[in-house]
Image (cartoon, rainbow, N blue to C red):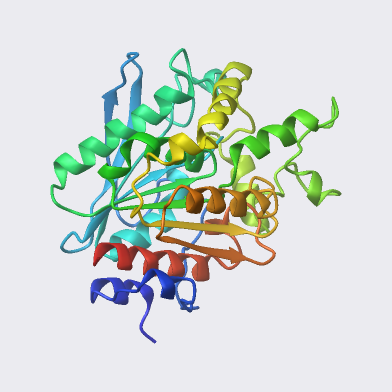
Amino acid sequence: MIGAVDLVQRGWRASSEECNQIQCDPELSLGDPGKGMNSATPPHEFQFTSTDGLRIACARWDSCGPCRGIVQIAHGLGEHIGRYHGLIEVLVRAGLVVYGNDHRGHGRTALSSKRFGDFGEGSFKLLVEDMGRLSAIAREENPEEPFVLLGHSMGSFAAQQYILDRSNSIDGLVLSGSGALDGLVRLASLAPPGKGNILNAPFEPARTPFDWLSRDTAVVDAFINDPLCFGALQPAANESFFTASSQLADPSRLRQIRRDLPIYLFSGSEDPVGQQLEGVRLLIDRYHKAGIRNICHHFYPGGRHEMLNEINRGEVQTNLLLWISAVLHQ
């Protein structure tokens, strides 16, 4: 069987109409998603200084063989770029150079564990600007190569904000575990006081407070035991994050996104961040109404929030790689 990596390397291309019908390669696996930075491909770690003086921890993974494109990963809330080592390994084997950073208040960028979830005075807006700074570094180091931005969870909402002003600077956008942020804000505001974790509520009685992440218990346990992972933003950071919801739903702002930007969304049907697909469908509808034409999606029955770490992650990864291949060869 020809795998997705082989198809990317051979220059396979799919139309936007075909991408939702892509079949998976069950032999492709992401490996263990709980091993942090310990991928077979060693990263080149570096830093840059953000506009508020904070040092942003970054990494680059070089492609195996000639570079066919760039993927920048924006990770989710409470985690770090090291959790993506399995995805990164598959991407570099497909000839892609991968960049990622630990967001402010996260991972190796956080000043200490006591500052986890703290964006600092720069707030969520500066987090998005940090992503733009890393994009500029990636393009400078790899001129003329096609560029795909992949955002997961909080990183996907940051990516939604990123393209409001920067859609001409990327060749494709991937949103994982995303949705309509304003819907998530409303859901949080309607939760009774003391209700606890609204994201885990649909899975009660639950084994852990993080069962909403994945059906794979090893993934959940790895997150809980990872010293660089945590469960919630600090209040000021959370407020700045939620404040972004208004412009992400503003039709006039959405119309500033270039209409031919290829966008790919994938989500699990049980993902509470996407409001069990309601928020994802709303986001797609908003993009369509803004005139964006090239939108593909995959929805996975039974899947939870981290589809890249789900029990069918090989299928998810194959579909993602095949979509990327179409963008690379447009």
Q: Quadrant of the C terminus?
A: bottom left
Q: Is residue 115 left or right of residue 196?
A: left
Q: Is residue 183 left or right of residue 197?
A: left
User: Could you tell me residue 240's position as x and y percent?
Assistant: 55, 21
Q: Is residue 315 visible?
A: yes
Residue at 40%, 46% in the rendered image: 37
Residue at 46%, 47% in the rendered image: 290
User: Could you tell me residue 195's position as x and y percent?
Assistant: 84, 32
Q: Is 234 above or below relative to 142?
A: above
Please name whichever residue, 281 or 302, is drawn nearer the observer in this view of the structure: 281
User: Could you tell me residue 100's position as x and y percent?
Assistant: 35, 41
User: Could you tell me residue 313's position as x and y percent?
Assistant: 53, 65
Q: Is 204 above or below relative to 2?
A: above
Q: Quadrant of the N terminus?
A: bottom left
Q: Is residue 272 left or right of residue 245?
A: right
Please name whichever residue, 86 or 49, is drawn nearer the observer in this view of the structure: 49
Q: Is 153 above or below relative to 125?
A: below
Q: Which image quadrant is residue 234 in?
A: top right
Residue at 34%, 53% in the rendered image: 261
Q: Which image quadrant is residue 117 in?
A: top right
Q: Is residue 158 visible?
A: no
Q: How many marks?
A: 0
Residue at 64%, 33% in the rendered image: 231
Q: Which image quadrant is residue 116 in?
A: top right
Q: Is residue 244 left or right of residue 186?
A: left
